[in-house]
Image (cartoon, grey):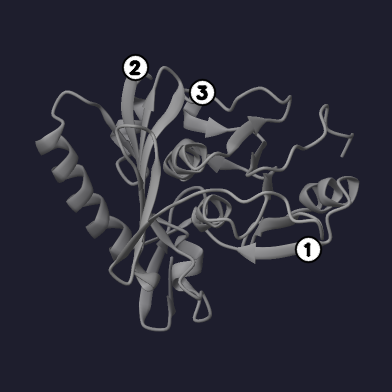
């Protein structure tokens, strides 16, 4: 099945998620580059189905060549799609690079595990903000917001809510635009590894639903619920939702 939106043609995969020629082109470029420069590090990429059969090793790359394909297809996406390369070691997201093409915004971690950004030719560090006295601002998925997210935000008494797509949400936490991003709907590890690493390097954290650090190498590369935080400290255990 194909759908055309604003000149972009997409096909739908078996899980009903869309994929475009841009996904495949980005996949080919990134996979070739990583295998050339890091031949001994496995690459698990969303659009390379055979890589999903690999078992987690002590270190590997997780690649999403076009994160936010649904946003990419929207005429009013506002650039909410990204290119993600995450590096996992010992089950933790330890390195990441995200490019936001429509915003010409590049974010990455360095070998000292500090987070950086470049926009408009200007480089600067990425550092989380303190929760403002007026209260925390939350980010919610634009395409996948659900009732559990709304219930969590009510329980935390957070009313300032901004919708955003793709791993852009991690970057908005890392640059100090918002304070928390709860996610209860399904995501895959390649959706989150790069963003989590950048957020952690900027001073934030990502927690599983029981309050423990978020881990990688799970069955089928599938994430459970998680809470990504800048300076905000959510209450655990989570309320019954």
* Closer mark to the observer between disc 2 and disc 1: 1
Q: Which residue is mark 3?
A: 219
- Residue at figure coordinates x 55%, y 57% from the top left: 172
Is residue 142 visible from the viewing direction of this image?
no
Across and down, in percent, residue 89 comes to 37, 22
- Residue at figure coordinates x 44%, y 63% from the top left: 81
Secondary structure category for the residue under label 3:
helix
Across and down, in percent, residue 210 comes to 74, 24
In the image, residue 176 sits, relative to residue 212, either above or below, namely below
Dot placed on the residue nearer the N-terminal end, 3 or 2:
2
Is residue 103 visible from the viewing direction of this image?
yes
Q: Which mark is residue 21?
A: none
- Residue at figure coordinates x 31%, y 27% from the top left: 60
Q: Which residue is mark 2?
A: 57
In the image, residue 60 sits, relative to residue 228, either above or below, namely above
Crowd around label 2: few <14 · some 14–19 · many ≥20 (10 Å): few
Circles 3, 2 touching at the beta carbon (< 8 Å): no
Cα distance, mark 2 to mark 1?
40 Å
Crowd around label 1: few <14 · some 14–19 · many ≥20 (10 Å): few
Q: Which residue is mark 1?
A: 160
Cα distance, mark 3 to mark 2?
13 Å
- Residue at figure coordinates x 36%, y 19% from the top left: 55
Dot placed on the residue nearer the N-terminal end, 2 or 1:
2
């Amino acid at each position: 099945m194909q759908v055309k939106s604003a000149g972009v043609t997409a096909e739908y995969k078996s899980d009903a998620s869309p994929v475009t020629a841009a996904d495949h082109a980005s996949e080919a470029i990134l996979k070739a580059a990583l295998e050339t420069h890091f031949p001994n590090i496995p690459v698990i990429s969303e659009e390379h189905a055979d890589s999903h059969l690999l078992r987690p090793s002590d270190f590997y790359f997780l690649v999403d060549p076009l994160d936010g394909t649904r946003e990419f297809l929207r005429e009013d996406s506002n650039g909410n799609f990204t290119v993600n390369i995450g590096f996992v070691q010992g089950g933790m997201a330890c390195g990441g690079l995200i490019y936001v093409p429509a915003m010409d915004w590049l974010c990455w971690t360095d070998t000292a595990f500090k987070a950086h950004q470049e926009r408009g030719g200007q480089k600067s560090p990425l550092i989380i903000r303190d929760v403002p006295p007026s209260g925390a601002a939350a980010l919610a998925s634009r395409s996948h917001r659900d009732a559990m997210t709304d219930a969590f935000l009510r329980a935390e008494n957070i009313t300032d809510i901004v919708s955003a797509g793709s791993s852009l949400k991690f970057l908005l936490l890392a640059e100090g635009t918002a304070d928390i991003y709860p996610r209860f709907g399904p995501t895959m590890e390649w959706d989150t590894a790069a963003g989590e690493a950048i957020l952690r390097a900027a001073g934030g954290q990502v927690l599983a639903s029981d309050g423990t650090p978020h881990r990688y190498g799970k069955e089928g590369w599938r994430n459970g619920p998680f809470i990504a935080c800048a300076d905000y400290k959510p209450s655990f255990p989570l309320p019954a939702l």
